[in-house]
Amino acid sequence: METVFSIKPLLAVLVSVAAVPFLIWSRNPNTRETWTFAAAFVKFGIVLSMLPAVLSGTQIVCKVAQVMPGMAIAFRVDALGMLFALVSSSLWIVTSAYSIGYMRGLNEHGQTRYFCFFALALSATIGVAFAANLFTLYLFYEMLSFATYPLVTHHQDQEARSSGRKYLLYIVGTSIGLVLPAMITAYALGGTLEFSTKGFLAGTGSPALLTALLFLFVFGFAKAAVMPLHSWLPAAMVAPTPVSALLHAVAVVKVGVFSVVRVITGVFGVDLLQSLHLSPVLTAVASVTILVGSFVALSQNNLKRLLAFSTIAQLSYIVLGLGLLSPKGMTGGILHIAMHAFGKITLFFCAGAIFVATGKKNISEMVGIGRRMPVTMSAFFLGSLSIIGVPPCGGFISKWYLVTGTLEANQMPILFVLLASSLLNAAYFMPVVYRAFFCTPEEALFENRVQEAPLFCVGPPVITAAISIILLFYPQPFFRLAESAVRAITGG
Amino acid sequence: MSHHFPALLVIAPLLSAFFISGAGWLNRRFCLPLAVASLGVAGLSALSLFWRVVQQGPVLYRLGGWDPPWGIAYAVDFLNAPVLVLICIVALLNLWASHRQVEEQFKEKTGAFYTLYVLMVTGLLGITVTGDAFNLYVLLEIASLSGYGLIAMGEDRAPLATLNYVYMGTIGACFYLLGIGYLYIVTGSLNMADIARILPGLYENKAVLTALIICLVGLWLKMAFFPLHVWLPNAYTFAPVPSAALIAPLMTKVMVYVMIRLMLTVFTPGYVFSTLGINDAVVWFAVIAIVMGAILALGQRDLKKMISYIIVAEVGYMVGGAWLGNRAGMTGAILHIINDALMTLCLFLAVAAITYRMKSYTFSSLKGLIRKMPFTMGAFILGGLSIIGVPPTCGFFSKWYLITGALQAGHYGFMAALLFSSLVNVVLFFRIIEIGFFEPFNEGHGHGEHGPEPMNEAPLSILVPLWIVALGLVVVGVYTSEIITHVLQFAIPKAIL
């Protein structure tokens, strides 16, 4: 595989950190938001400029500093990292627009702090996406944990404080308590931390030790919210909705699964996991999370909590896809990083738009809301279709590949898990949509008069919903990236 | 001139201490420039020595031209050269940060403070640079006595805390002296290199064993190795902040250095790790120190006490790492001497900034502090992240080596203790961040811009050195590779694998 040296990955990481001083010293909010947009567009532009090279099979590498003998802060852009970076940097632009609508619509305090830490969080996300080794990944993973803490606790009240505690306890507790010893053990075994397509742990330790290591990693990256380490995510819903939307549906949680994917493919390697017969265990853990998460989502009345549990379940689709260790399943899993992102962010945007326009958080209070906010609720409908995995939305493709992956791996029970989960998804999303549009005038809690949230709140979900549809008909470049990532991993 | 640097390192501050004391009587304005100049000379000597060691290897200096073992030798090698630089940097930065507070707080005692300050640094530099076991004791007493004075200048219960420290510290120093006495009886020499040359034939001798054990106990008392730590928390808490910010980063760390020096140079690794067979027990003591330090830190309600107990835990890191008996553990321990000194300095300078404005260092005075003193708290958080061990701050890298060492030695208890203490540190620092960020609740956060926030930041004379240290934590972390490949790997004998 061809490799090219370039500082573009470093620039892509740093551009949003570099924007922070400008955000702080902007004299008025409009200038400040201009800087955010500038940083977001530049970031997306840099990521996009690397896309053709990555699609043609080139890897872009950049070594920043040798921090310890045998360990460096280094970036390497491959298909997998590119896919994730593309998703998060493009959605940052949309979310920035949405943040303006939401934060100003609610007249929130501390907006400068909010935009600064948002920019920091995005830097960390891209850092994880482009990390060339486990150490760099861990560095940015931790940076993301601490950068999102002020965002989660934005309201600075008692509830935010206790949620922030839970957030840190789970996220930082596991990364120090589980990932750090696992990483040091992996380094002691393999003598390196560089990701490689075949992994670097093959033939280094006893099967029991390697199995233990794998689970230290899978549970240790608690941002992936694999049960039983999931309950930080519903708690983190006290954050302002744009934070929930971008960070807790896309960036933070996907950083978690992305790290798991990297460990499965780059540290252990598919062959090693197959020889250890770990596929059934991984898929079983993921299946439990999928089913339990969906069942809990059924009983939620708070819309954002429902979305949180739905996210917990959907994240495990990705773990499940990778755990199948079959090419189709892995393609589906990786593709789901992108497909779920666009669908779920739409849903969060809608939940926030409803809150801005009406102040309602609970589903029981949203009967008939389709009359008042038809655009928002249509976007919500499309987003939920994508999550359920039916046409005309992109979620269909990833689910299709996951299902064929289960057949390929000959794991029939998993097929039923996926089908059951789809039904459950429909069962918790469709009533929301149905009750929003179809109810008798007596039942309706809203007047029959269209009154949407501000444009900056309504525009973004419409855009992301539209992208969700487009992704069904035009899934490239994500599809090609996922395919070439899987080709690199399986060597086929 | 340049070959006299090892002597200059000690002589310059020692002599200037007398002049500072005189200036204290005549005109207090001269005290600070004199102190800065003498420490500057010492710092430049240390830097150039460090450079020479890295370029050409160890330097041996004969005081007065007398050859060892009769004369006193000063030996600078890869182990103590970085420690010398560290002492000078910490002393100078703290002087910069605290001079304003010293002059406001001590008034007519300013001269006395600077005299003791410079004497303390003299002692520490001497302990580090000397190659003579008895000379080390003399300089240890210089450092300790001036340290007692510095702590006793505090208010409230400072005199009582100092008395406690005097008792414990004197016992510790006596133990060390006794141990050296035994060694002298057996070997007839006081020069470290000379003792190391004579000892191999005497390893079976019970007196040698006694000497080592007694020395170690003395040093452990001095470095506050749990359960010999009881003097430390009160001494550091009731000491005036300018004193605490010098003593806390340096005293325990220099004592750890002396322990490692005895282990590596005087008694040789072969004897300490193989013949003796106590390393496992010592590491278990370190485990207890780490766990207890962490737990006791959790129970504190003021910043200085909390940091004091963190130091108790960190001493456990270093002792445990050194006694693991492998290269990674020893590297971690030595690296942690540097890192922990910088982290402790960062935290204490932040405490200095907070006390300067708030006149208090209890947790309850931290309310809303992230808004009032964002720069101070920013540096404090950076220091906290380093103590927790978050990359790329330096605390992560020493912890990495310590854990690797524990793993290689198969000492999972030590590994678990390190992780436990990291997790407790997360709780400790985020508890403070919570108080600073959320409280007081009654101000009505939530909706609406509050308008321009009232900021009450510490003066630049504290903030600038504080941020130099805070950024230094990251710089040292990123340059860990350089430090290890160019310096530390030569500090550890090849016999340790």
Image: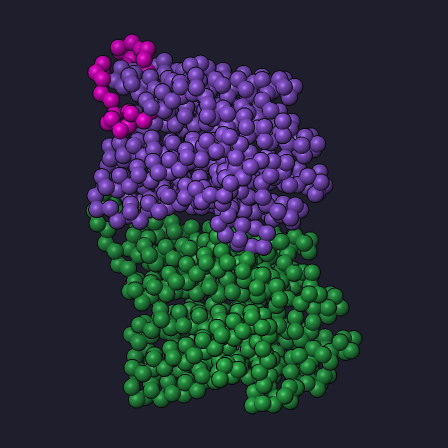
Chain colours: A purple, B green
Picture coordinates of residue A6, whole percent (x, y):
46, 43
Is residue A165 depicted above or below B425 in this figure?
above
Residue depicted at 57% across the width and 26% down the height: A330
Residue depicted at 32% across the width and 18% down the height: A377
Is residue A489 depicted above or below B15 in this figure?
above
Question: Which of the 4 image quadrants contains residue A326?
Answer: top right
On the rendered image, what quadrant is the C terminus of chain B found in? bottom right
Residue stretch in magenta: A436-461
Picture coordinates of residue B47, whole percent (x, y):
48, 73
Q: Is residue A181 left or right of residue A349?
A: right
Residue furthest top as drawn? A440
Question: Which of the 4 image quadrants contains residue A145?
Answer: top left
Question: Which of the 4 image quadrants contains residue B76?
Answer: bottom right
Q: Taken as a whole, is the magenta stretch helix, strand or loop? A: loop
Is residue A476 depicted above or below B406 in this figure?
above
Q: Does residue A303 appear in this view?
A: no
